[in-house]
Image (cartoon, rainbow, N blue to C red):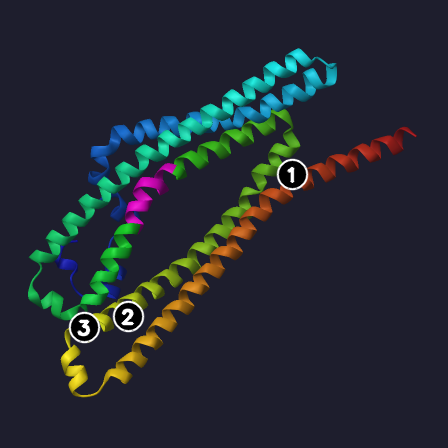
Amino acid sequence: MPAENDGDPAARVAAGPHPVHNLWRLRRYLRPYAAEFAWLLVAGLAGTAAGIAVPLVVQRVVDGPVAGREPGALIQLAGLALLLGVVEAVLIFIRRWVQSSSAVGMEAALRADVYAHLQRLPASFHDRWQSGQLLSRITSDLSVIRRFLSFGVFFLLLNVTTYVVVVALLVHLHPALGLLVAASGVPLLLISRRFGRHYHAASRRMQDQQGDVATLVEETAQGLRTMKAYGRGPELAARFAGGARTLHDTGVGKGRLLANTSALLDLVPNVTPGRGAGRRGGRRRAGRAHHR
């Protein structure tokens, strides 16, 4: 938070560096937890590998003991599937336990630096900024940064790796189905881009409204006696109710946007295997008709 960026926030965003550069500046907060992050990544990849291996074991169960009616081998493979599930659960627990502690440490370091910087800023900066807006941004922005550093980066690497491995396995097992699953990533990418654009605008609008409500609450609390002396209680209460109602409506809109997008993100992967199965069934029916 350099001092030369203490002017208008909109101008600062427009003239500021690229967002990726801003994220790169946060690397020093990740550096103390680099070893933990490496172990988290190893645990996440191992847990994902265990989860991916379970369907392969199920395939062996169907093609082997079930088809050959061998109960002994069925028990062995079922035990292997159970062991893989237990390993995955343990790795997920360890990952989340360590991840939570590192996230708290990073957020504490971020907050300490931001608060120390606010103390060094000149009084003219605080005259230009409403205290409620500062409080809202410090609270919400640091929480978003903490979640991204501790969860967003980790799951971005983990999910990309999982997608590549699963597509490669599907292409090896059934090329047509694997290519179909790989192609389903295109609509998911388009849906995610559209969601990010609208959700970002709604988040910024909600952040501004939170700052306005926080500023009104603080000003009302500081001037409580003056407000009572001039009988402006009902007017300020109406202003607060209007701001809170607007903030509520914006939050509900964000929730609806998230719900609709989540439904679409769940729909595409669920429809894709059905389309692949429908095509395979159609080819089988066509082959049987040809032989007749």
Task: Locate residue 224: give its quadrant.
Answer: bottom left
User: With 35 as the anchor, is 92 left or right in this view?
Assistant: right
Query: Disc 2 marks which amino acid?
Result: Val
For the residues labelled 3 and 2, the Cα–Cα distance comes to: 12 Å
200 to 273, vertically: above or below: below
Which residue is under mark 1?
273
The reply to whether the magenta stretch includes residue 146 is yes
Task: Locate residue 240: give its quadrant.
Answer: bottom left
The reply to whether the magenta stretch includes residue 28 is no
Which residue is under mark 2?
213
Return the x and y of residue 153 as percentages of the image width and height: 35, 40
For the residues labelled 1 and 3, the Cα–Cα distance comes to: 59 Å
Q: Earlier in the sequence, mark 1 or mark 2?
A: 2
171 to 156, vertically: above or below: above
Query: Disc 1 marks which amino acid?
Result: Pro
Nearest to the observer: residue 247 or residue 145? 247
For the magenta stretch, what is the residue range?
Answer: 144-154
User: With 254 as the anchor, is 276 left or right in this view?
Assistant: right
Q: Which mark is residue 221?
A: 3
> Nearer the observer, disc 1 or disc 3?
3
Quadrant where the C terminus lies? top right
Q: Residue at x 22, y 66 (%)?
A: 132
Return the x and y of residue 43 as percentages of the image width and height: 38, 27
Most distant residue in the bottom direction: 230
Q: Residue at x 25, y 61 (%)?
A: 136
Q: How many marks?
A: 3
